[in-house]
Image: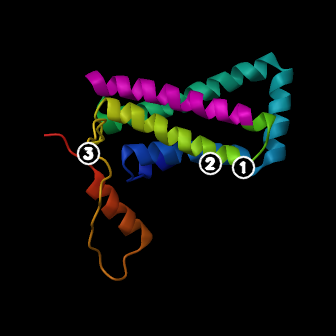
Amino acid sequence: MDAFLAETDHDVASAMREGLMLVFRYHLEDKERTLARHRLLKQSVQLRNRELLTSHRYERLFRRWLQTRLGDEGVHDSVAVGLAGAAVALHNSYLRRWLLNPSLEILEQFQNEAKKLIRVFLSGYNVDGIVTDRTGGPVAVVTILGEISDTEEVCDAVRGALTVRSP
């Protein structure tokens, strides 16, 4: 996660979402390991306490990265603290759901909820040009690219066209 965040050139919302999904997928990729780990944690107070420390490190990693990307003063510091805590809490909530019912549908649900959560935080504080007040209905995006543009170039062009900057 640390390496991903340090090297990503994604916008804040996309990087947060991808970071969360990276950790979530790690837990889901080996169902037996994750379920065994959960059983072990339930049996030991010491291991549960250690798990809490790991969760705090996960949150701190996001917070520090957000502070670096957004600037650690004033309003953006509030975004970094709040979004990091809320994102990790959401991750833990969906992981607990998965532990009760190991289904891949949880992955898509988590991804959708993470996207909403991140958007609410960033739009509420007008970060990266994401604004809450979009009046007037649907938005049409027109972008012109070369014939051999790859998927990432198309996504970057559309993302750039949708970004609304404040004056």
Instruction: Identify the mark nearer the N-term, 2 or 3.
Output: 2
Q: Amino acid at mark 1?
A: Leu
Q: Quadrant of residue 100?
A: top right
Graded by Cα atoms within 10 Å as few (under 14), some (14 to 19) or many (20 or more), the crowding at tag 1 reads few
Seen at 27% across and 21% down, the residue is 74
Q: Specify the segment rendered in magenta.
A: 73-97
Residue at mark 1 to residue at mark 3: CA–CA distance: 37 Å
The circle on residue 20 is none
Seen at 66% across and 22% down, the residue is 52
Question: Where is the N terminus found, in terms of image quarters?
Answer: top right
The circle on residue 136 is 3
Instruction: Identify the mark nearer the N-term, 1 or 3.
Output: 1
Task: Residue under label 1, please give it.
Answer: 104
As displayed, is residue 123 above or below residue 153? Answer: above
Seen as rendered, the residue at the extreme bottom is 147
Camera-nearest label, 2 or 3: 3
Seen at 77% across and 49% down, the residue is 30
Q: Amino acid at mark 2?
A: Glu
Residue at mark 1 to residue at mark 2: CA–CA distance: 7 Å
Graded by Cα atoms within 10 Å as few (under 14), some (14 to 19) or many (20 or more), the crowding at tag 3 reads few
Residue 129: give x, y in percent of width and height.
26, 42
Task: Residue under label 2, please give it.
Answer: 108
Element type where label 3 sits in the image? loop
Pick whichever, 51 or 158, lies toward us: 158
Residue 119: give x, y in percent of width and height.
41, 38
Q: Are marks 1 and 2 in contact (CB under 8 Å)?
A: yes
164 within the magenta span: no
